[in-house]
Amino acid sequence: TYANLMLTPIAPGSVFKTVIAAAGIENGIDKNRIYDCSLNMYGEPDEENDKGNLNFERSFAQSCNYTFTSIANELMEKDPDTIDEYAGKLGLTEKAGWSGPVYHYEDFKQFPEEKNPHLWGDKTDKTAERAIAQTAIGQKNVRVTPLSVANMMTAIARGGEKKQVKIADSILYKNGTTMFKFPDKEPESDNISPYTAAKLQHLLRLVVTDQEGTGRRFQSLPFEVSGKSGTAETGKGTVHKWFAGFFPSQQPKYAMVVVELDTHSAQSSANSIFYDMANELARLENAATR
């Protein structure tokens, strides 16, 4: 069940703002511009989620919808393929798992159950402000797999370089000799630039270090964590809660994503599980070095 969940596309919520942030950075967004985060994603008053006036960086840390729907609409007006382009650069428009020729198999897949992600339900949505706004925050028709999101975090931590995910490095004969070694493979789509990756690393760390950041609870972990939270409405009165990230921030070893499906709770078990798993990994590393 858990393996299938990792390979099934679901709405990513605000984790998808990472894509819009990358697009904004590579298109020269003014980092000092101030956004009115008392407004909702459509630019209407939102008294329940009034975050005040925030710049680009703090908007990412506090997950201000209005900032990223504004950026998305402005970029899409210039180029209606912007979201597709940067979702592709971050690995969210194709399968993440390793595939390729293995002996007589022309297209062997390490994750044969992995499903294709998708972003749009109708091409006309690319010119509709409200549809773009919903897409920019990972709603409407956006569906990506948790495996792809984890791989996106890995690519950012690696400086922008994407690689296909391997569950096995090689196949061995019974006597221990190598039958086949799965080579590292890069997807065919372009990467974000190293500069953009560095800026995204900074933003993802700010989610934790900002006093109002959505990941501020991770400040007490032995590891420095960088990541992004997300809440995706399902249309059924429930939400999917996400936290995706990597750690330690300066010299990353691990990328992880946790998703809590169909919850009514305002509190995120995804954050709690991510915290506990990162804490346990730190404990195991400390024990191993004693």
Image (cartoon, rainbow, N blue to C red):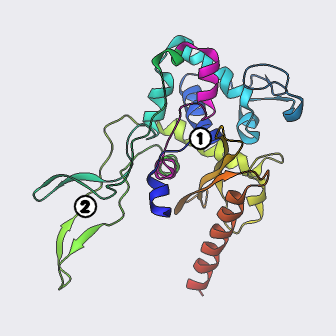
> SS class of the residue under badge 1?
helix
The residue lying at 35 percent from left, 35 percent from top is 189
Q: Position of residue 263 (x, y in %)?
A: 70, 52
The residue lying at 53 percent from left, 11 percent from top is 78
Q: Mark 2 is on which residue type?
A: Phe
On-image quarter of the C terminus: bottom right
Q: Position of residue 169 (x, y in %)?
A: 30, 66
Tell me if 6 is positioned left or right of 227 in this view: left
Q: Which residue is mark 1?
A: 200
The residue lying at 40 percent from left, 46 percent from top is 162
> SS class of the residue under badge 2?
loop
Give the residues drawn in magenta, as a range: 127-151
Magenta-highlighted stretch: main secondary structure? helix
Tell me if 219 is positioned left or right of 12 in this view: right
Instruction: Residue 33: tell me if it is visible.
Output: yes
- Alpha carbons under labels 1 and 2: distance apart: 30 Å
Q: Which residue is mark 2?
A: 182
